[in-house]
Amino acid sequence: MKTLRKLLFALAAFAAVACASAPARADAVVYTTRALFNAAATNLTTLTFEGIAPPNTVANFPSPLTLSGVTFSGPSGGSLQVSVLDSGFFAPLFQFNSGAVLGGFGFIDVTLPAGITAIGTDLMSTNPTGSPFQVVLANGQTFLVNTPLRPDRGFFGITTDVAIASIRFTTLSAAPGQSPGIPLLDNFSFGRAPSAVPEPMTIILFGTGLAGIATRARRRRRG
């Protein structure tokens, strides 16, 4: 009887640990619209880049730009890291019905605060035909995002069950010999994915096992 009680206790403890750690979703979920991303993520902070560049001009940053704990940078060793461009600067080149945007030089690296598991941003390029973006997470996961023609904006959103340390956005050529254009970001949102909950099947299996052991113990006592 003591052995059975010990076994029952051990299984209950194991079930609690397994249920607490069982993920409820895949490693990464990608969203193609802001509405879906906003519905999935929590505690979001959004950077709009407004008020940084004077009207109809540009603010250049020779060193990385940090806003609300998020750092935006470009190629190391370059004379400029990133720029914030007002929509009136060289119109209509930077007009995406979005106001000011963040621009890079080939790519934009984004370093995030600790614990961020949700990212969403509008994506654009100065190429009027719409350049695709390569998006690479710090863990090496890579995604390809197509962008529409100006003035429409593309969107990339992702939630993961592990923290995202950094992410890189690079414009690619849409056709051989074509310029990829300057990568542009706006409305950069970051926060957290929903907390993981135990999967129903995990709970059912452990519950069934524990119930069977309890029934067996009662029968032995009656015997």
Image (cartoon, helix red, strand yellow):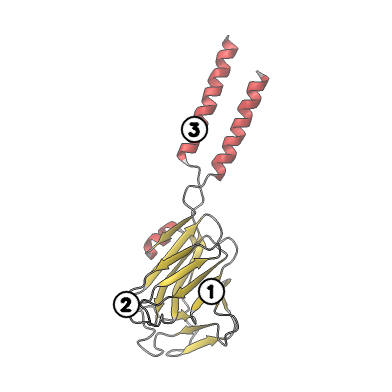
Are the residues tagged 3 and 2 within 8 Å (C-beta)? no
The answer to whether any part of residue 45 appears in the image is: no
**How packed is label 3: few (under 14 Cα within 10 Å), some, or many (20 or more)?**
few
Q: How far apart are marks 3 and 1 (CA)?
A: 44 Å
First reached walking from the N terminus: tag 1 or tag 2: 1
* Amino acid type, mark 3: Leu
Q: How crowded is mark 2: few (under 14 residues within 10 Å), some or many (20 or more)?
A: some
Q: Nearer the viewer, residue 25 or 75?
A: 75
Q: Name the secondary structure under disc 2.
A: loop
Residue that badge 1 annotates: 109
The answer to whether residue 194 is seen in the rendering is yes
Pick the quarter of the image with the N terminus.
Answer: top right
In the image, residue 13 sits, relative to residue 105, either above or below, namely: above
User: Which numbered disc flags the more N-terminal residue, 3 or 1?
Assistant: 1
Percent coordinates x, y for residue 69 in the rendering? 58, 71
Q: Name the residue under label 3.
A: 205
Q: Which residue is drawn at 53% across and 74% down?
A: 109
> Which label is found at residue 157?
none
Quadrant showing the C terminus: top right
73 vs 25: above or below = below
Give x and y (percent) for residue 189: 47, 68
Few, some or many C-alpha atoms within 10 Å of disc 1 (few <14, some 14-19, many ≥20)? many
Helix, strand or loop status at disc 1: strand
In this rendered view, identify the residue nearer to me: 23 or 59: 23
For the residue marked with disc 2, what is the amino acid?
Leu
Instruction: Report the residue marked by disc 2.
Output: 149
* Mark 3 vs 2, N-terminal side: 2
- Disc 3 secondary structure class: helix
